[in-house]
Image: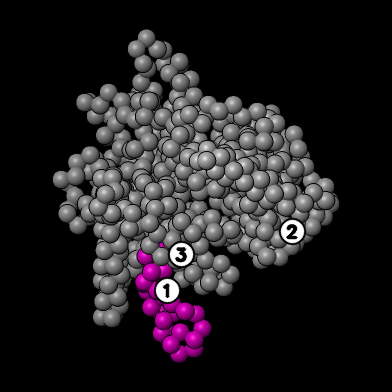
């Protein structure tokens, strides 16, 4: 009887899956676009959890070009690149039991999608996991998003760029000393770039400054700052668990010790934010100038609006929960994406010494033989186009985000693709195909899958006249586009370029060969490690710790 019952339940489940696939298929079959059917939607939370838990097994699962399971896996776009679009065309539809996904790899159509924020909104339900500490700009929509964007724009204005530059350059200089230590036999880079990105964020957002080595030497930090940074580091390192599990589960007596550690970090970080907000409000009440950090910007912007709101009922100020929520989102988005980009960029440079020489030539030319640590943002950043090209090329091929989906919501709309208008039904995810557009030979040539930063510099007579390539709209959108593009774009660019100066201005990075391995073979192994990547929450290398890097001074 039990076996029969289980069989009936399984058959009922399969029948319901088939029914909902048929319902969704019937909504789009008359559009005239190619259709692929998948038994599971790629954003199914349980399926994502299974992929994460059994990733080492599932990554060996044979996905063929025609298999209906090919497009179920979270982050399938990274592995597929432009292949499905090459086979099916500029637009095609993935039909799943939950909803339909329209993938678009057409520059004009993508530009149109990004420009029509009311027709193609953000799928907020996909981002609700970011409400760990409270509502925030990433999960807001419509007028509420406009309100939060206005109140949270301060931390990302141009006045912060010199701070980002100075701290990133200082941290990179610290890393240089650390990696070149006589005791060092080579370092793995992923953890160090995470620490660097966290230290830069801590300085710009909270004015907490740490020497790089303090990540290995906790005694160098005060109890207060250690509590703050360690709490944030634990939260960010365990972002998926932090976002998926309720806080109560992370403090339940029978929960694993690792979960309890995360729960303790969440409570500690919340206390830290509350104290920061309280202290900033006291400074405001006493008419004292603020600290100028992230919390100060959010509290003061909200305080100024609060006075106006009480008089005119115009814009509602941020609540404490919204301040906490935005602090977390800025830390999560600003840290993880930058840390991942640095991790990929450094290893790709290790595997390509000729690109190291290429950016060293630029750094050396514009530093004018001054000490690298004395270089200033205002005089230097805009000149280092080759260093920025390394970031752009890294994001082209190894963008931390699998895509930037949009949503038609409750209203149908039209979209023109290759001169033909399509009536897109309601409740459809419309996905500008980032991975396809970033790698399609149509836009990037026959070597589109090759990491070659030189493609971003147009031909010129000398270093002084080099110009950064501007790709056509809709072909490169590493920070998204339109009104809801990433506010931290400049922050990330300045940080990355400063790190390039600090690490490669006077040094050469080489892989440490395994026993009996040549340096050339070691570089090929580094490339294999970089390419062996997968999306969990963001794109990650599966085993970056298998590569050790040695830093040597240039002659």
**Considering only vertical position in the picture, is 555 above or below 77?**
above
Residue 381 in view (yes/no): no
Q: Is residue 402 left or right of residue 428?
A: left
Kindly state the secondary structure of the residue where label 2 is placed. Answer: loop
- Assign a secondary structure to mark 3: loop
Residue at 30%, 75% in the rendered image: 281
Residue matched to label 1: 318
Please give left or right for residue 128 compared with residue 132 in the image: right
Q: Which residue is situated farthest in the top direction here? A: 516
- Tell me the magenta residue range: 298-326
Instruction: Report whether 455 appears left or right of 230.
Output: right
Secondary element under disc 1, as helix, strand or loop, is loop
Instruction: Give the answer, above or below, for where 547 lies relative to 88.
Output: above
Query: In this figure, which residue is indicated by the disc labeled 2?
Result: 425
Q: Are marks 1 and 3 in contact (CB under 8 Å)?
A: no
Q: Is residue 547 shown in magenta?
A: no
Residue under the point 46% across and 84% down:
309
Q: Which of marks 2 and 3 is in front?
A: 2
* Residue 545, horizontal then vertical, whole percent: 36, 29
Which residue position holds label 3?
136
Foreground disc of the pair 2, 1: 2
Q: Quadrant of the C terminus?
A: top left
In the rendered view, how is the structure colored? Answer: one colour
Q: Which residue is nearer to you in this view: 31 or 325?
A: 31
Residue 435 x/y as whole percent = 61, 40
């Amino acid at each position: 009887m039990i076996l029969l019952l289980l069989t009936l339940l399984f058959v009922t489940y399969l029948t319901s899956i088939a029914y909902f696939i048929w319902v969704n298929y019937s909504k789009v079959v008359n559009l005239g676009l190619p259709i692929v059917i998948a038994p599971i939607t790629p954003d199914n939370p349980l399926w994502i959890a299974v992929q994460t838990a059994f990733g080492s097994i599932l990554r060996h699962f044979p996905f063929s070009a025609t298999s209906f399971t090919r497009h179920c896996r979270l982050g399938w776009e990274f592995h597929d690149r432009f292949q499905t679009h090459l086979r099916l065309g500029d637009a095609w539809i993935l039909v799943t039991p939950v909803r339909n996904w329209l993938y678009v790899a057409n520059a004009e159509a993508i530009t149109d999608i990004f420009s029509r924020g009311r027709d193609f909104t953000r799928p907020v339900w996909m981002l609700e996991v970011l409400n760990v500490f409270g509502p925030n700009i990433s999960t807001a929509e419509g007028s509420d998003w406009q309100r939060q964007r206005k109140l949270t724009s301060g931390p990302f204005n141009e006045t912060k760029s010199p701070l980002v530059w100075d701290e990133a350059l200082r941290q990179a200089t610290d890393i240089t000393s650390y990696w070149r230590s006589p005791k060092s036999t080579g370092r793995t880079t992923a953890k160090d770039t995470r620490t660097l990105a966290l230290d830069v964020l801590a300085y710009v957002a909270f004015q907490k400054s740490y020497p790089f080595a303090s990540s290995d030497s906790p005694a160098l930090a005060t109890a207060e700052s250690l509590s703050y940074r360690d709490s944030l580091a634990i939260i960010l390192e365990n972002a998926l668990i932090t976002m998926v599990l309720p806080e109560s589960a992370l403090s339940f007596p029978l929960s694993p010790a690792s979960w309890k550690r995360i729960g303790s970090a969440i409570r500690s970080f919340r206390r830290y934010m509350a104290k920061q907000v309280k202290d900033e409000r006291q400074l405001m009440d006493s008419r004292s100038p603020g600290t100028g950090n992230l919390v100060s910007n959010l509290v003061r912007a909200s305080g100024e609006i609060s006075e106006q709101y009480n008089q005119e009922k115009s814009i509602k100020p941020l609540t404490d929960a919204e301040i906490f929520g935005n602090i977390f989102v800025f830390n999560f988005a600003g840290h993880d994406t930058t840390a991942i980009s640095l991790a990929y960029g450094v290893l790709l440079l290790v595997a390509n010494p000729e690109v190291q020489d290429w950016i060293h030539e630029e750094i050396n030319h514009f530093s004018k033989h001054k000490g690298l640590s004395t270089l200033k943002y205002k005089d230097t950043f805009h000149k280092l186009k080759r260093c920025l090209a390394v970031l752009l090329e890294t994001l082209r091929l190894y963008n931390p985000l699998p895509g930037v989906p949009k949503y038609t919501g409750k209203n149908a709309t039209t979209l023109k693709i290759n001169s033909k208008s399509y009536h897109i039904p309601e409740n459809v995810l419309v996905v500008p195909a980032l991975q396809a557009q970033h790698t399609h030979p149509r836009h990037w040539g026959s070597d589109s899958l090759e990491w070659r930063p030189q493609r971003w510099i147009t031909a010129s007579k000398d270093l002084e006249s080099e110009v950064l390539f501007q790709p056509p709209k809709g072909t490169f959108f590493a920070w998204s586009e339109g009104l809801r593009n990433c506010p931290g774009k400049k922050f990330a660019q300045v940080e990355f370029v400063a790190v390039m100066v600090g690490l490669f201005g006077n040094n050469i990075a080489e892989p440490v060969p395994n026993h009996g391995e040549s340096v050339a073979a070691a570089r090929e192994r580094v490339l294999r490690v970089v390419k062996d990547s997968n999306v969990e929450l963001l794109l990650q290398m599966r085993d970056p710790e298998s590569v050790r890097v040695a830093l040597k001074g240039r002659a």
